[in-house]
Image (spheres, rainbow, N blue to C red):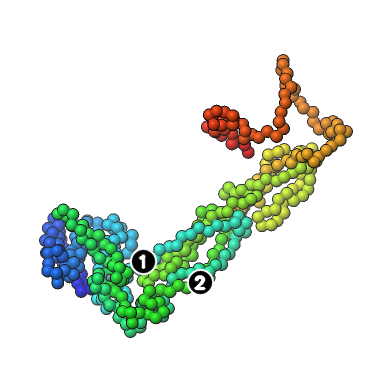
Amino acid sequence: MSEAVGDLYEVLQVPRDASKDDIRKAYRKAALASHPDKVPEAERETAEVRFKAVQQAYDILFDDEKRQLYDTHGMGAFNGSGEPGMSGGPDLDDILAQMFGMGGMGGGMPGMGGQARRRASPNEEQKYEVKLEDLYKGKTVRFASTKNVICSLCKGKGGKERATAKKCSTCDGQGFKEVLTRMGQFLTQSTVVCSTCNGDGQFFAAKDKCKKCKGKKTNEEKKMLEIYIPRGAKDGDRIVLEGEADQVPGQEPGDIIFHIVEEEHDIFKRAGADLMATIDVTLAESLTGFSRVVIKHLDGRGIELQHPKAAGHVLSPGQVLKVPGEGMPIKRSDARGDLYLIVNVKFPDEQWKPSAAVLERLKEMLPKPDVRIQADTIDEVEYDPKGNAEDFGSQDPAGGTAWEDDDEEGGTAQCATQ
Ligand SMILES: [Zn+2]
Ligand SMILES: [Zn+2]
């Protein structure tokens, strides 16, 4: 960098105890004197750099918070990302780091232009769908990943060993261009990355480029990665592979972050650490009992139930059997949630053709109806034994809104449809 920028007070030519008013006056004077539009063509590049330096010195010294940071820590306070008081945004950070970081190193370190700061390259975030079985048992997944890795031949320099990068003349080695636009009597400036050097501020001549990476500084490499999904992991959990994102010269590599997405399961529903499933039981089993496997768990185990627990107990449709400790594992503990089994009683279908005698005996054995509805008038009616609850309200001219109306009254329709 031809114009090494020194002390910010010197840039504006004000004493260290200058008032804000002094700083503003000095800034106006200096900006006017160094404005690229006010100098001959030949001096324009130099003037532009000086103009920028004046601008940035003013940005820091006129802002009380930034000025205090500068006074106590020097430019180092502005070289990292996310520094306090840097409400000016990352653009200002970048500009300052490049201008001052480079000046501080005397320009004698090829390949380091604008990279005085070590900033993390972007993280790579992706969704990862996991089966409930794998969330139950835990799983190690290995997969091949292609990523950019710092070139092993040039160590990320981009050029041959002895070669020196040439300073980019388009941006005067800064990696960015300041575009000045006049709006009425105001000048606004915006920063754009230099397209000639891709923001490096320098580049190697074709003959000097590294043979392996062709000047790109990185090469694509296949790497085997391994992630471990802990037992009990759940939807939304993150698994971080630190530093496995694409490498960028001069930056800490970012992380690959997997966001777990739990696949829907055919049999089990999950809520936190609890599981729920429906089991089928025949009418005979519900009445007379059984001892058998009712469901296969997520780890392949058969879950066996003994019914009844006490003589004479029957299972009703929709009855809930709670099995403690057979839910999902809870991460980093031996505890588990509970398993809720919903009983579905399978009544006999058309295949069942009992004789009149059998039915008569059943009638005798089973409990008698204990409520007789009393009414003065009685009509015997026809009925369709295969009616569909979804037809309910469908003849309403308003468009079959009966269900929705019910919903508004507190979700009774939802219960009815289940
Ligand atoms: Zn450039
Ligand atoms: Zn290389």
Horizontal side of residue 351 vs 146, given as left or right: right
Which residue in the structure is indicated by mark 2?
A: 223
Q: Is residue 7 above or below residue 128?
A: below
Q: Nearer the viewer, residue 314 or 197?
A: 197
| Residue 269 coordinates in the image, percent (x, y) | 61, 48
Give residue 39's quadrant in the image: bottom left
Count of marks overlaid on the render: 2
Give residue 152's quadrant in the image: bottom left
| Residue 36 coordinates in the image, percent (x, y) | 15, 65
Horizontal side of residue 14 vs 73, given as left or right: left
- As drawn, the residue found furthest toward the top would be 376
Residue 155 appears in the rendering: no
Q: Is residue 91 above or below residue 303?
A: below
The residue mark sitting in front, 1 or 2, is 2
**Within 10 Å of the Cα at label 1, are there few (<14), some (14-19), or many (20+) other Cα atoms?**
some
Q: Amino acid at mark 2?
A: Lys
Q: Which quadrant of the figure shows ligand 1?
A: bottom left
At x 24%, y 76%, the residue is: 106
Which residue in the structure is indicated by mark 1?
A: 119
Which label was assigned to residue 8?
A: none
Q: Is residue 380 above or below residue 87?
A: above
Determine the secondary structure under disc 2: strand
In the rendered image, the quadrant that contains the N terminus is bottom left
- As drawn, the residue found furthest toward the bottom would be 162
At x 46%, y 66%, the residue is: 242
